[in-house]
Image: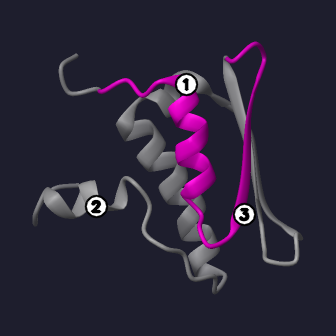
């Protein structure tokens, strides 16, 4: 259990809100804070991505938030959107070659 670092719930929402910059992202906790929904919008305010009912527990785990946000970012990048780096993109580079 040492490897998993728990992220506070409030921080999960703020990480999500910056993870898709320069696009806008609004994140909210639902189900009494047990689940999270987030939406990503383009500069005109048109919705690009809608992710609903992700378990908060999964996002509080660094591996879980990297996986979920990484997949969402990849889908936007594949559609031609340019995204800035986000809080966990640096962590991946620090691991060096050969790690997943």
Assess disc 2: are there few (<14), some (14-19) or many (≥20) residues with their C-alpha within 10 Å of its C-alpha: few
User: Which label was assigned to residue 90?
Assistant: 2
Q: Is residue 6 left or right of residue 29?
A: left
Q: Give the distance between the C-alpha atoms of the residues marked 2 and 1, in whole angstroms.
A: 21 Å
The picture places residue 7, in percent across and down from the top left corner, at 42, 28
The picture places residue 6, in percent across and down from the top left corner, at 37, 23
The residue that label 1 is drawn on is 9
The picture places residue 41, in percent across and down from the top left corner, at 79, 66
Q: Earlier in the sequence, mark 3 or mark 1?
A: 1
Q: How many marks?
A: 3
- Relative to 97, residue 2 above or below: above
Residue 14 is a magenta residue? yes
Q: Tell me the quadrant of the picture where the C terminus can be found.
A: bottom left
Q: Give the distance between the C-alpha atoms of the residues marked 3 and 2, in whole angstroms.
A: 21 Å
Query: Marks 2 and 3: in contact by CB < 8 Å?
Result: no
- Relative to 15, residue 31 above or below: above
Q: Is residue 74 left or right of residue 29?
A: left
Q: Secondary structure at mark 2?
A: helix
In the displayed image of the protein, which residue is found farthest to the left?
97
**Residue at 28% over, 61% down:** 90
Q: Is residue 1 left or right of residue 85?
A: left
Assess disc 3: are there few (<14), some (14-19) or many (≥20) residues with their C-alpha within 10 Å of its C-alpha: some
Q: Secondary structure at mark 3?
A: strand
Q: Give the distance between the C-alpha atoms of the residues marked 3 and 1, in whole angstroms.
A: 20 Å
The picture places residue 73, in percent across and down from the top left corner, at 56, 65
- Residues rendered magenta in the picture: 5-33
Q: Secondary structure at mark 1?
A: helix
- Relative to 65, residue 95 above or below: below
Q: Earlier in the sequence, mark 3 or mark 2?
A: 3
Q: Earlier in the sequence, mark 2 or mark 1?
A: 1
**Residue at 44% over, 37% down:** 64
The residue that label 3 is drawn on is 24
């Amino acid at each position: 259990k040492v490897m998993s670092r728990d992220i506070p719930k409030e921080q999960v929402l703020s990480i999500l809100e910056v993870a898709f910059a320069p696009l806008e992202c609004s994140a909210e906790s639902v189900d009494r804070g047990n689940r999270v929904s987030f939406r990503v919008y383009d500069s005109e305010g048109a919705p690009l991505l809608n992710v609903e009912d992700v378990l908060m527990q999964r996002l509080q785990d660094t591996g879980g938030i990297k996986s979920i946000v990484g997949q969402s970012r990849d889908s936007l990048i594949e559609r031609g959107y340019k995204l800035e780096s986000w809080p966990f993109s640096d962590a991946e580079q620090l691991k060096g070659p050969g790690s997943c």
